[in-house]
Amino acid sequence: MRMALCGSVAALGVCAGTVAAAPPPQETDRAGLQSALDAVHQAGIPGVFAEVRDGGRTWRGASGVADVATGRPVTPDMRHRVGSITKTFTAAAVLQQVERGRVRLDGPIGDYLPDLVPGERGRKVTVRMLLNHTSGIAEYIPYAFPSIQGPEVSSRSLDDNRYRTFRPAELIALGLAAPPTGEPGGPTGVYSNTNYLILGELLERVTGTPAVDYITEHVIERAGLRHTGFPTGPRVKGPHSRMYEGLWGFLDPPRDYSVYDMSWVMTGAGLVSTMEDLNRFYGRLLAGRIVDASSLAQMQRTVPVRALDGSTIEYGLGLHKVVIPECGTFWGSDGTVWGAGTMSLTREDGGRRMSVAINLMRWNRPDASGTPQPHPIDDALEALYRQALCGDGKPDGRPSH
């Protein structure tokens, strides 16, 4: 899911395309990075941890707690639910099938899944449109979790679905039944997790293997990741933090949702990983070691996409593009699920990489009109991202979108 982290990140100037000028990348400033992490914790995030790579140098740091009740500290090697970063893995798996000739990137999805996406929509929506969110197919989350919408927001549907096992087809049906967000192939996309659940079904149809198994063997293992995988139950295996959901102030204090059945968003946002693994993955993807050069070029063809919070991002096939003047062009993704947020960006030459995890989501309380208001966490995260990506936490002005 990509529901709120990019909302805050777009305001931070990291998600929406172009960031204000900053000095060229410098040697990793370990003290500065730790200070920036500490500032995020002090601003209100219970726990934050990160890995930053700069050439052959690697820095890992953490600040705050993994459990607010016990005071157990977060550590840099913790596993974390990484949300929509999963989409890059799913997209890479689909591109591998394109390379093998089993899938046509501009082929109609109805050619492969006529029962799932039937009729005119199946004929008009292509695989590419699903990958870059220009399909016009709506998001299913408001229908699967109705209590998080409207004037009387509550956590009821989050709590009711904690241990529920969803079938992808039932979630996809919710998105297909909702009013379309636009015509297939329009100039601007609208972010939708429904697209990536359909892609999961596509993978299963063309490979004869469950999508999570195919992605595990051909993307995760191919990248040499040791601590990344799809959960097989509601609990995260291995060292991890509790994950606190604020629900825009409607949960006060925030509630722990680290135990949760992730079938509600599996091939769209279900992965668990570490910051080390994410930096390794994006580095190898951009080096052409997960998909070939032509596939990577397709993944890096971006269109403007409107996120669920209304911000606009430059989105390719499972990849975000972020341009920082004098600092470089970065590729990666951000992601959020209930209580957990992650950002991972790698400079296109692979030299500078940043992955950051936080264990609180949707901290921005709305005003009387329902608009989420700025919070000190936003500024602290902005400074951390700039420090990690550019070697300087002092922005020269605001971002241009």
Image: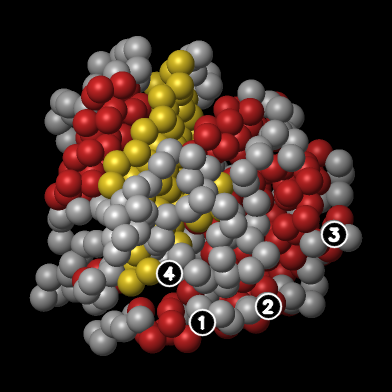
Secondary structure at badge 3 equals loop
**CA distance for labels 3 and 2:** 16 Å
* Mark 3, residue position: 209
Helix, strand, or loop for circle 1?
A: loop
Quadrant position of the C terminus in the picture: top left
Disc 1 and disc 4 in contact, CB within 8 angstroms: no
Among the two numbered marks 3 and 1 on one chain, the one whose residue lies closer to the N terminus: 1
Question: Disc 1 vs disc 2: which is toward the camera?
Answer: 1
Earlier in the chain: of badge 2 and badge 4, it is 2
Say which residue appears at 46% left-offset and 27% top-offset: 353
Which residue is denoted by mark 1 in the rendering? 161
Q: Is residue 94 above or below residue 21?
A: below
User: Could you give the CA–CA distance between mark 2 and mark 4, rounded to whole angstroms?
Assistant: 21 Å
| Residue type pointed to by label 4 | Tyr
| Identity, as a three-letter code, of the amino acid under mark 3 | Thr
| Quarter holding residue 268 | bottom right
Residue type at numbered disc 1: Asn
Coordinates of residue 240 in the picture (x, y in percent)? 48, 53
User: How far apart are the alpha carbons under marks 1 and 4?
Assistant: 11 Å
Image quadrant of residue 21?
A: top left
Within 10 Å of the Cα at label 2, are there few (<14), some (14-19), or many (20+) other Cα atoms? few
Question: Is mark 1 in CB contact (under 8 Å) with mark 2?
Answer: no
Q: Is residue 237 left or right of residue 40?
A: right
Q: Earlier in the sequence, mark 3 or mark 2?
A: 2
- The residue carrying mark 4 is 257
Query: Is the image coloured rainbow, by chain, by secondary structure, or in one colour?
Result: secondary structure
Q: CA distance from mark 4 to mark 3?
A: 30 Å
Q: Position of residue 46 (x, y in %)?
A: 27, 54
- Residue placed most toward the observer, 31 or 383: 31
Question: Is residue 293 placed above or below 16 in the rendered structure?
Answer: above
For residue 392, say whether it is visible: yes
| Gap in angstroms between the C-alphas marked 1 and 2 | 13 Å
